[in-house]
Amino acid sequence: MKSLQIRIYFLQILLQYACFYSREIIFNPQPISSIQVSSIDKYTAFYQEVTDDNKWAFLSRIQGGICVISLQDIQQPTLVTIIKTKGAYDMKIRQNYLFVSDLEEGLLIFDITDPSVPQKIYTLSTPMQSYSLTVTKDMKTLFLIGNGIVYCYNIQDVKNPVFLSKAGISTPITNKIKLDETESLLAVSNHVAGLQIIDVRNKNDIKLRASQLTASKVFDSLFLPGNSVVYAVDSYFGIYAASIQGILDIPMEKDDLFPLNFQIIYSSPLFIMSIDMTKIGDYFILGFRSVGLKLFKVVNQNYFSPQYIQDIDGGQMCYKLILSSNEKYLFASNGLSLVIYQSDSPQINKDFPNLFNSFQSNVISGFNDPWPWEIFCFNDSKHVIIAGGSDSTFIFSIDNPYQPELITKIPSYQKAAYDGLTLLYDQSPQTILYLGLSQLGFYVYDISDLKNPIQKKHIIPSSVINDSDGVHVNRDNTLLIIGNGSIGISVYNIKDDKFNPKLAGEFINTDQYKCTFEKCAVNKQSDYIFCACREQGVVIFSYQDQKVIPVSIIQRVGTEYPILSADETHLFAAAGFQGLIIADIQDKFNPKIVSTLTVDGQAQTIRFLPQFDQKYILVSQMEKGQLTVINIEDYSNPYIFSKVSNPHESSSSFCITPDNNSVYFIGDMGLRYLPIQTSLKIHTQISVLTVNSSGKSFYQLVNRGQKLKVGQTVQMVFVPLEVNRDIKISQVYYYRNYENKNLPAWMNFLSSEKTIQINVDKEGALNTFSTEKNGENVLILEVFQEILISDFVSDVISQKIATAIMGALRIKGVLSTYNFLDSNFDPNKFDYLDFYNTDIIKDPKTDAKIQTSIKQILTFSKVSYPIRFFIESSLRFNYKTFKQENIDLFSTPSYQIIVYFNINQKAKFIRKTFEGVLASFSDDLSSLKIEGPSIKVNEIVSSQIQIANLTNNFNEIIFQGSVQDSSNYDIQFQENYLVFQNFIYLNNPVTLNQSSSLQQQFNKAYSNGEASVESKFQFTFDINTFLDLDKQQIIYKAYVVTDSSSAPLEIVQTSNLWIEFNSQTMTFTGFKSISSFLSTERIQVVASDGFTEISDQFTIYFNQLPFSYTMQLIFQIVGPIFGILGVWKYRSNIYQIFMESSYLYSNDIAIVGDLYKKQIILFDDVQNNAKQLWKALNKQNKNLQKDIISQYSQQNSINISEIIKKMHQIFDKNHKIYPNLDPREFDFEDGRLFRTIRGYVLKILLDKDKFTTQLFKQLKREGIKKYSKNDWYKKYIHIIPSFEANQFKIINKNLENTPLQSIMRYKSEINKLNLNDFAANNTPQYEESEGKSNIYKLRNNEQEDDVQEYKNLNPFPQIIINITSLNEEIKKQNQKQYDSYLLQEFIISEALGINQNFFQISPNKGESIIAYPHQINNITAYKKDNGCCLTLRKVLKDDYRKIALTINNPLPKWLNCEIMDGIIHIWGIPKAKDEPEIQIRIINEFLLPVYSFIILIKDKEGGDLRDKKYVKDKDQQKKRQKSETQFKEKPGFSYIQNSIKQGLPYSPKNQVQENKIEFTKSVFQNILKSNFCTKQLNQTDIEKQISINLQQNEINNNQDKQEPENAHDIQINTLNHSISSNIPDENVFSVDNTIQSPKTLTNRNLESKEQLYLQSKTKINQLYSIEDHIQSLSSKQVWQSNQNKNIKLQSSNQ
């Protein structure tokens, strides 16, 4: 078993070595990065060490210490720290330790577990200078050299090295020491004594085993794998190599020396300093002084003949070279910096055809035949044979490809033309020739002796005259197929006797095909034959049992030559003027043409270029003398890659030599040679300018096959490989439109650096002259190779003659001083070089050969070297992958982008407003254009575009459009919706919230949907009744539905119907007389988003009589009694006298100029339902109260949610018992039902806690003393209404995400009563809970897709415990034992109006009223009456009188009231001149007050405005201040002052205009101060947006006659329209005598209070309109500001 494992191990090693030996490595010539340390101080960098993971490097600098360098980002190495030393020189890293040889201190050892913070753990002083060291892999032994002596130490205890032995030759200076791979030998590079080898197998007795001098100093050395050879680097003379086979055979105990027989394997006049080698020894690198590095390859372990590969750029010194552990990087220290190179595989651009060296082409007119038909290349790549069309058949030798030599010719028989020929495949040598004749059959020749072909057989396939145009042999050399022109085809068996073919099948064309059969092809199985039939196409024959039967034809006129793909699935044919045809022949009976590509001339012959794996086809064009290379990687889209033209020359056939080096084609000019490969190798290093995360730019190497993108900055560096001579790239051409052109403006060639700088342009991404689609680009390097004297030396040219030739060439100017060919050299014009002189005599026998050789050498020193790369658009529409790959929908380097969509008639775009871009929709919503910053366009298009589909077949919805940017060509697209559904969304139809239908809401507002006649009713449905998931505006229409066939009647806001509908507020109002008693009406509401609509209905049952109306009927019956008493008329007064204390609350304070808010909850029937559910739960669980008390005692908490869940179960089973209870109440953790049940639980706990109960009663008594018995709790809490409003309307009814949103609790969840973590002194510690979103999911919906959302319609006000006040009062009561949490929670419960037993006549409780919204008749304000009998009226509670109008406007002007979602909202901003004391009464349907409180208005200083003396003093103070600044505050003062400053004359007319402007500013500033918008515009923006037209002349003319109706017209100009609004404000006064305040003007023009009311409403609406435009302007300003910031940011980044 162990033996098997060893074998497997060695097999793996062999496989690894085989893999490595087949590899090719080069180094990119320019470093990928470097870090300069010389700038730190004056010290020189010497040696470097790198950790195995290539993450850290250490660079020694003797007295400058050791630089610790991070290589985490190898493109950007960074200096982390410097280890201070006295003389750090060489280093070695093993495991987590750094060993340092220090010239001053000896041996230093550092712990580098954390490389950024090295820790010195040991110092060993040595008696000599320590130059170099190394450590064994197991870190047991260290070798240190000084003065030529190697010291061996045991370092198993790294903190205590132990000396073992020493050996060597004493010298003053030693360079480096290195171990072999087995760590048995140690090489010493000695500055004076050459190379020493130490035997270190016995660490206790190491021995000198070899010592040998070289020509000079040995600076470095290297053991090669297998310990077979050692290299010694001689600084001045090169690399010496010596075999050391057998050195380890010397016994360890002997002192014998092993002889080193050095031989120089690489000579160099340059100073060599270092060497390193790959692990398996196939490559090594030399480091030179000042000139960089050189890479060598060792082929087949021939270490004595290394092959030069390349130069690597470098400068200064190269003290040491280190290959990284993975051999990906090469680290060099050059005295100034640490330099890092990256290895790569050669990219020599030989994976595509190179027919660009037409300069090297040559034609030989060795035969005189204007119509040669076919040429065949022999397998040996040394001969070609040509079938002459009218002369003979010729055989040429191509030993010298450039100068073919005619060997022999086969004369024509009876002057017949030779039409076709072939040789046997895979025969070596090829000795049999089949040669076809026109009209005379074919011949069989024995060509074993090429100089003397022997005719073996002459066969005429048919009894009639035939052409034998095509001669073809199948792959296994068993069948010979002859194309017999118009006669047909013949098949011969040559399996057994190649010289005697036997007929094995024949097809005689008896007018079946009107064409002549030419060349044929046959498949591998030889059961199908494909023959070109010139006038019709390619005929496919089945060949079975010697029967040739046509089965199909590929119709195409002009077909000449067919070939098959390697897998035989496709056929390629030259089709004359139609060019190349590609056909799918998998079904032989039904072939299909895949594509056709025309070429310039008559396509005659086609062949694969074999070295490119059938990716390219070469086609000859007969009359044009042209060869065309066609790329066929995509059979459906072949394209012309390149062309070679020889004007005035025909080209009938060609062949490619099997070595793939040459192509020979024949025509009327003779035999032409063209190279298709060059021996020159040039590596292309392509890198892209990149910016890292820290903002530093560098060039990032491009991976093989990676495309360049438009907009990138690219650098191409060209590196000659394996060339031991100078190379000059004189010019670079851009191969475009099949010709060499100058480089475009976006490319720049730096000839001295062999580099091209490219700013990638869109021109390179689109091929406009062919069908190529991948952005293929080709550069042609015009390369000149240095011509050496040795190039001319041959069997006929001696060294002396070669020298003379070189001299003559320089004299004639053919060669430059640096031995490069002159760029104007033309080989076609080079006839003769006369280099002969008195020492060199012309020999006519060799002169012609010498001249040909000179011409060839000169011609081939110039090479056209193609470089291919691909460019792709950097503009990408990633609609298929952007979500999976998490990338942008549009990728572009441009800042701006334009996207255009057009949709067919099956859908429409939904018009939206997109922020940050310019977007436009067509009128018919069929197109959309979005233009703007790429980031914003990406954001919008990927998530915000929406369509309304007009069909359910999404394949029918077709999008067309384009994407544009400033860098690339436009992208055009056309896709159906299913492709775009990842980012274009369908319009979600308007849906009905099934949990909140109109009928349910109406039933809640009016019990069981029953309304009263003779009473005005009002119903507002919830905004969430109809849902639009897209948040589009919903348009509402309402109809009265009749049972008749007549159409429903639309309800509008002002109609003659009994009902009105306000679609803006979603409110119905109506009135039915007594005649409609017991009638029923159905109302339908239709909700639409413009594309979809849905409707819902509710029914009103008019079967109720209002109490007042009933009482009136009763009084009509018992009129005399009540008429005498008059009790009913004064019922409100009577109720007020006896019951005022039950509904009167303490005073509220409103501050002048501040927003006053009050919120009162309408509990409807929830508390009654809660009481019933509580009783039902008690019946179900008779121990409920005990369980609650027990749980609270044990756990200090009660889980209210569990109680609610049980009640929910009761409700589900008996929901008919609770018709008015909204099921959603069970979902609201802070809702009315939860709060009510919470109050019940608190009451139970409080009743069992006598101490807390007693304290609660005491606190209540104290609270009543300061406040009323109805709101005593205000002494201990703060109440904050949970809605936002401005002066005129509610902005947000649910205040979300505010700091004081939730009730303060003691470290508990909202649904738990918790007593944990109480402080010992019972002082509660409260924390403010985060604002909760009032979004809840419907219960009983398991599928997430069906879950709808709605908001809690009845949020309580926010209540905060006043801890200070509460604790002070508790301290006064001297109560020590109580439940602080329970006490506070019960106070909150009382404040919220939670009560088990409530009095129905006065339903107020806390901040709530137990009533439905429709049971509130009105909310009226009263002011203090100062009339007569005031004392009596106080006693009778009649000392307040109503304010304003009784019906239309029951509240003062500054105060607003609105009942919304079961909440009474009261708000407003009082002014100093408003009534300082008003009483607010909430009146129920019986016209009895149920809730009353007084609002006292105070000023900012807290002064009571009821105090007339205080008000008078304030007024006098203001007058004094006003008089002091009166002149400065005059309207014209600012104008006069500005005029004086600017040196302008004062004009009264201009002053009037200035007054108008100042007035308008003040009007608008009042609007802004009144909270019309959330963001204010500054003064400058207001002046820009507002233009004032006062119509001054008209006002002046009518000043004495009448007042203007409106003092000012203010216009707000937006982008597309303007809105003019009249702004009334009683605080704004005119600035001159011609202008009056709007209030004065309004009062003068109104004749009645009703008109005043209507006028006020109109003006308020106008103010709302102004507000909306102010917000629009503010939003625009913010958007513009953000845009400017983005532009600045982009500019900064660029």
Image (cartoon, rainbow, N blue to C red):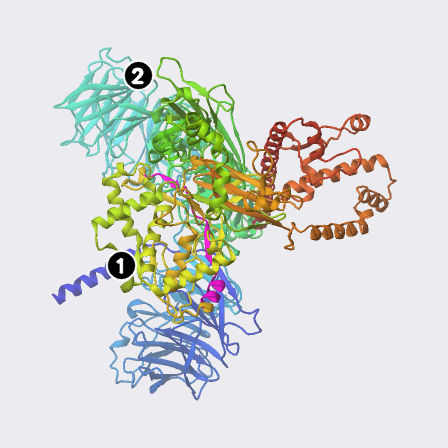
Q: Is residue 414 above or below residue 41?
A: above
- Residue 460 colored magenta? no
Outermost top residue? 511
The residue mark sitting in front, 2 or 1, is 1
Going by the numbered disc 2, the residue's amino acid type is Gln
Which sits earlier in the primary sequence, circle 2 or circle 1? 1
Decide if residue 484 is on the left or right side of residue 348.
left
**In front here: 243 or 221?**
221
Can residue 596 be seen from the camera position used here?
Answer: yes
**In the figure, 1109 relative to 780: above or below?**
above
For the N terminus, give its image quadrant: bottom left
Q: Give 1359 or 1682, whichever is nearer the viewer.
A: 1359
How far is mark 2 from mark 1, CA to CA? 57 Å
Q: Residues within 10 Å of mark 1 (few under 14, many from 20)?
A: few
Q: Which residues are magenta?
A: 1347-1370
The residue where tag 2 is placed is 536
Residue type of the residue flagged with mark 1: Gln
Q: Using residue 240 as the reference point, say whether residue 841 is left or right of it.
A: right
Q: Position of residue 700 (x, y in %)?
A: 47, 53
Can residue 830 be seen by looking at this rendering? no
State left or right for residue 1269 relative to residue 1684.
left
Q: Quadrant of residue 1443?
A: top right
Q: Are marks 2 and 1 in contact (CB under 8 Å)?
A: no
Residue, disc 1: 16
- Where does residue 192 sit, x and y in percent of width and height? 45, 79
Task: Please tell me whether mark 1 sits on a helix, a strand or a loop.
Answer: helix
Q: Residue at x 30, y 16 (%)?
A: 536
Q: Is residue 1355 magenta?
A: yes
Q: Secondary structure at mark 2?
A: loop
